[in-house]
Amino acid sequence: MFMKGKKGLVVGIANNKSIAYGIAKAVADQGADLAFTYLNEQLEKRVRPIAKELGSDKVYKLDVNNDEELKSLEGLISKDFGKIDFIVHSVAFAPRSALDGRFIDTERKAFDIAMQTSVYSLIALCKACENVMNDNGSVLTLTYLGGPKYIPHYNIMGAAKAALESSVRYLAVDLGNRGIRVNAISAGPIKTLAASGIGDFRSILKWNEVNTPLNKNVTINEVGNSGMYLLSDLSTGVTGEVHYVDAGYNIMGMGAIDKDENNKTIMKWDKIR
Ligand code: 0WD
């Protein structure tokens, strides 16, 4: 039981397909005691049963863009737990209109919304919980290859993920003197509610499946298990990192190749289309 005695806050569960659910399940299976947040009443109906399933009755309302709700976290956590050992930040949002068309057309308002919800929220959450975090704790966020590289349609979320990955490094230094680690998992594409907002997502999934060294897409269980490692004492020497859980896609310098019936080299993608 790698997480026995550890207490943590999970932000960003929309349903049982969410990456945050995969992480919460993995740490709960290893003995962690959890509190959950929900964005609105509609999602509360989903999050409460998930909390129950994972052995928790601690469920807080939190819109990461709401300063009052962020402020109330410290009191809630200290009442329910005293202190916590880890935070899972699995939140991102951009207006749908900004996830299509040319990046150059991104509007100021959409840029602000995406940056506030997907990047500033990590900084704000760390600040809100700083006083109720135990020394040697761990913070984990979720990012995507669309930050460091171009991915079709990802647009403003790409810029947001690049800023998020940079924020991970700066937060790692700020909190490092207390032994608190801050890391990101860069997950491969997974069909979730948030992903349904990305254009051509089915093609992105298929492309990844064909072009990863492991010939597959990752699952929320696989991201969950890697998340468990980063949240546990197994990774006390790791901070400021972006850890890829993407079946190896990020190492590929070009698409995977295969042979056709005449033993001629072809792109594997062409074979399955
Ligand atoms: O392919 C994917 N699904 C990948 C996702 C690949 C790599 C990374 N990620 C990232 C996402 O960018 C995000 O940061 O993983 C994180 C979690 O995303 P998810 O699990 O794919 O998506 P989802 O199940 O929708 O959970 C994200 C949730 C929101 O769901 P909805 O669908 O309602 O937007 O983030 C929460 C909300 O529950 N959320 C908020 N929570 C608090 N305050 C807010 C907010 N303002 N906005 C969204």
Image: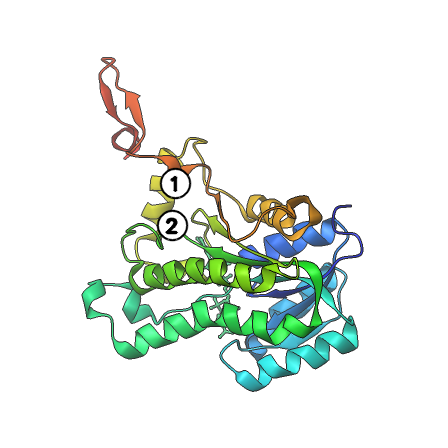
Q: Is residue 82 visible?
A: yes
Q: Is residue 72 above or below residue 226?
A: below
Q: In this view, does 255 lie above or below 167?
A: above
- The percent position of residue 108, horizontal first and vertical second, equals 27, 77
Q: Can residue 90 be seen in this view?
A: no
Q: Which residue is drawn at 32% across and 73% down?
A: 111
Viewer-closest of 99 and 3: 3
The quadrant of the image that shows the N terminus is top right
Name the kind of residue labelled 2 in the image: Leu
Name the kind of residue labelled 1 in the image: Asn
- The percent position of residue 118, horizontal first and vertical second, equals 44, 67
* Numbered circle sitting on residue 250: 1
Q: In the shown orientation, is residue 199 left or right of residue 177?
A: left
Secondary structure of residue under mark 2: loop
Q: In the shown orientation, is residue 153 left or right of residue 105?
A: right
Mark 2 C-beta to ligand 1 under 8 Å: yes
Disc 2 residue crowd, few under 14, some 14–19, many 20+, Cα 10 Å: many
